[in-house]
Image (cartoon, grey):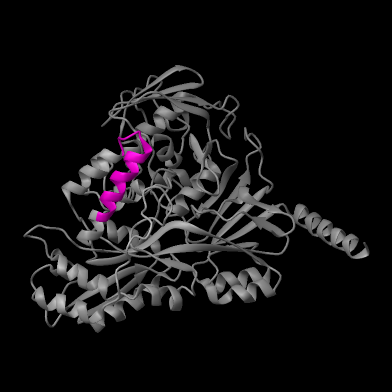
Amino acid sequence: MIRSFSLALSVAALTAAVAQAQELRIGLSSEPTSADPQFHALNPNNALALHVFGALVDNDETQRLTPGLARSWKPLNDTTWEFKLQPKATFSNGQKLTPRDVVYSFCRVPFVEGSPGPFSYAIKSVVAMETPDDETLIIKTATPDPLLPNNLISVNILNADVFGGGKNIKFKPGGCEDFGGNPKPVEFNNPAKAIGAGPYKFVEFTLGSQIVLERNENYWGEKPYWKKVTMKPLSNAGARVAGLLAGDVDMIEAPPMQDIERIKTSGATISQALTSRVIYIQLDQFNDPNWKSPTVKGTDKNPMLDKRVRQAMSMAINRQAIVERIMGGVAVPAGELLPYPMFGSTKGFPITKYDPDGAKKLLAEAGYPNGFEITLATPNDRYINDEKVAQAVAQMWTRIGVKTNIDAMTAGTFFTRRTKYEFSAFLAGWGSATGEISNSLVALSVSHNPGKGLGTTNRSRYSNPQMDALVIKATETIDDKEREKLLQQASKMVADDVGILPLHFEIRPWALKKGLTYKARSDENTLAMGVKPGPSN
């Protein structure tokens, strides 16, 4: 009884101390590339946008759909959806959220200046929008789009009036009528303009330094616990851990595996979840006679246009060794783009067998008995152990005769250069925002066609029209069983082509100081709204 009472006092005192602070300080492993919520389809950007803006549809920590700025939605027929907005939803400046704001936001998505990863894929099926009253939005699609609510998780809603949106704006694919102003991404750095309907407001967004948020007291939903949130980019994993242990920050993303026990011993806690994020390698497959792949040496051709070469480079990678030695066992080898049993994945999907001798034979058959030289590009602050994984792959490729150099850089630089097609081979990651493999296939493997929101992150320019047709048909199929079957066929086709080289799925950990809890999320978002004081789980 005395021990229980002491424990209760201890927890109460801890909770009181945390409550007194009312500030949460987070160490980010990778910072957002912009404060503009429609600039870049990237996890850090998406997570930040959820704090300040919000979307019609939200999801929970297991990626199940939940109401967001829309309280409900339903299909009226195969190509028409009705969304009902939250009646009490307002922006942080007190203005009521209206269907016009949603139309304005959708209109801007394809026209965000300089976007390296547009959200066009999310609304590519939308052909018309109607606003019959102040709380109702009717969305019509060109073809049946069963994943429309899932995709709208990524489309953050802007305040039309702040940026001069037209009073009579009308949605049209390719360009809206009476669109009005289209803000430049940098304008969102100004807190006076970055007005959203999320639980927080911007106070400061300084790239490379810090992001400061303040609780939105006008928020229509459940108010978050923390009055002030400060996010600091700490790309160096050691610096993040040191910051947590020294009390400089309260929570960190992606603590390194080798420090987990030390963190636990200090009294801090770990929260982790298997994610939908696949770490992969894309190989330049641009099939144009005038194209010279940027970093390939030792041949005048692009050797990766030959499937046998791609197979060899995949067979040379020992995925299990990477998981065990680089990832500390906290990852799962990957054969396709989404882990089973998520929707569209296949149980027992084969993982490319490590076979360096077989790889050498394939290279010789393809006309490269002496191999060639290439540079593998990678971010060094975006994914868990990203540069270390790239280094390991480089050594494995070099062993089969493909002499491999490493070009490591910050995520911001990496994505900018990737957009310009400066890489012949690169390592990156993708998490399915919808929890379906269709999201990964559409972004990474379908032929690059940004105008249609297809292949927006397919920077290898891999193209297989038959596979494209399967994926597109799947995304228009309402029947879940039939859609899943089509997606499984498409996934196998990409694997048979060696169109992309999946490496592993990440298990994402967070570390929190004693007295804080956080429900680990499979979408990897770090949300201050989910951090609460209390005894550890």
Residue 453, above or below 18: above
Taking the image as shown, residue 424 lies to the left or right of residue 3, namely left
Q: Residue furthest top?
A: 132
Taking the image as shown, residue 323 lies to the left or right of residue 123, namely right
Which residues, given as a range, are shown in magenta? 475-492
The quarter of the rendered structure image containing the N terminus is bottom right
Residue 407, above or below 194: below
Residue 212, above or below 249: above
Q: Nearer the viewer, residue 421 or 179?
A: 421
- Does residue 171 appear in this view? yes
Q: Quadrant of residue 364?
A: bottom left
Q: Nearer the viewer, residue 453 or 100?
A: 453
- The spot of residue 425 in percent (x, y) is 25, 67
Q: Residue at x 69, y 47 (%)?
A: 225
- The spot of residue 82 in percent (x, y) is 44, 23
Taking the image as shown, residue 447 lies to the left or right of residue 409, namely left
The quarter of the rendered structure image containing the C terminus is bottom right
Q: Residue furthest left?
A: 289
- The spot of residue 514 in percent (x, y) is 71, 64
Task: Let me know if residue 474 is in the magenta part.
Answer: no
Taking the image as shown, residue 20 lies to the left or right of residue 338, namely right
